[in-house]
Structure formats: C-alpha cells, structure tokens
Amino acid sequence: MGISAVRLGVVGPCAWQARPGTLLALLPEPVNSDVCLQAAGYDTFADGDEEWDEDFKRLVESLLGDLTQRHGVPALHAPERCLPPRRGWLPVPRPKSPPALSPLDALASAGHDDQRLEFACAAFGAARSAALFTSDGHCLLWVWFAANSEVDELVAVVRRAVASWPCRDLAIDWTRLIPSTLELSPAA
C-alpha cells in the first residue's frame, strides 16, 4: 500500500539558524509504528511497503520542485553519520566518502534510514527563504519558510505541492518531534 494521505501540521513560529520563520510538518500515511510519534499524540499506525517508499520519494520530489520554482535552487547539507565508537576510541567518520547525493536522494534517504545520514537539509535560493528537512529515519518532512508570509499562504503552498494525495490537518505535539540537529527553535 502506497501513501494514502499526507497529514499537515502547523508547528508555528520557529527560528532556523537564528532566522525567524514559520515551520510546517508533513507526515505521509500510513506510518510504521513509532514510539516518538506515539509520545507526540499520533496513534494511527500501519506498515508501508515498496510502493510507499516510491510514493515518499515522489512526495519529496514534488516539494523540491515546488520550493525550487518559488524560492530558487536548493543547496544541500547532509552530513554523514559517524561510525559508532569502539571501546576507548573516539567516533570517526566513515572511511570512504560515498558519491555525492542529489537533494532528492539525500532527503529521501534521511527520511527512510538513520544509518547513513544524520539529516538532510535543502535550503532554497541565495536568500535561503525556505528549507526542507528530513532526519533520523523518520518519514516526517519539515518545511520552514522565512518570516515574510502569512501561515494560510504557506499552508496553501504546501497543499498544492502535495496535491497528488489527500492532505488533512493533524494536531499533535509536533515540537516533541523536532530533531535538535536541525537547528530549529520553535517559539515558546
């Protein structure tokens, strides 16, 4: 079963790298059982499959295309995870650098697998007026916009980008799910 719907959450005012903006979250359904999502108040779980994986990549591709058209070419930041330390040793980067990933492949990979990339961030345009994040092998997509638009306008932009699937609002405690590695700071 592929993606049946995309759930949209307005996290609200949020700074990224000390720049004010607005953060939205997207959660494609069905979602594999996840203790972090359950702690945030989400409770509708089911297993995905290869079709779901393909749909997830199409979802990321759609968002990338729309954000690129509106905000400019993305710059990718996707650091490799360090190998786990052996006793008495410090963590070290993987010995061989794999080939560079495209923004699409990096974002899809970081949203599926927590072994290779720590996270993936595509920052759009020279002004970095928007950014798309995935991390930790969670299928959550975080979309940040610089503080120059109304929330309703931003929600409409995201809804158009994910128009291939039904898009419904989801009110859970999104702030519990924001990875610290993304340098996102929700307003208190």
Image: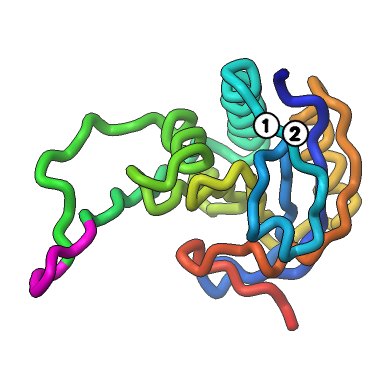
Q: Amino acid at mark 1?
A: Asp
Badge 1: few (under 14), some or many (20 or more) residues near its Cα, within 10 Å? few
Which numbered tag is attached to residue 165? Answer: none
For the residues bearing labels 1 and 2, Cβ distance under 8 angstroms: yes
Tell me if mark 2 has few (under 14), some (14-19) or many (20+) residues whose alpha carbon lies within 10 angstroms of its own. Answer: many
Q: Which residues are magenta?
A: 84-90
Q: Residue at x 64, y 23 (%)?
A: 52
Asked whether 79 or 65 is in front, the reply is 79
The CA span between labels 1 and 2 is 7 Å
Query: Residue under circle 1?
Result: 47
**Nearer the camera: disc 1 or disc 2:** 1
Residue at which label 2 appears: 30
Percent x, y for residue 69?
Answer: 64, 30
Q: What SS does tag 2 mark? A: loop
Which residue shows up at 73% across the image and 43% down it?
A: 27
From what the image shows, is residue 65 above or below residue 111? Answer: above
Q: Please, what is the dominant secondary structure of the magenta stretch?
A: loop
Say if residue 152 shows up in the picture: yes
Q: Is residue 169 left or right of residue 56?
A: right
Q: Earlier in the sequence, mark 1 or mark 2?
A: 2
Frontmost residue, 168 versus 48? 48
Quarter of the view holding residue 6: top right
Q: Position of residue 7 (x, y in %)?
A: 81, 42
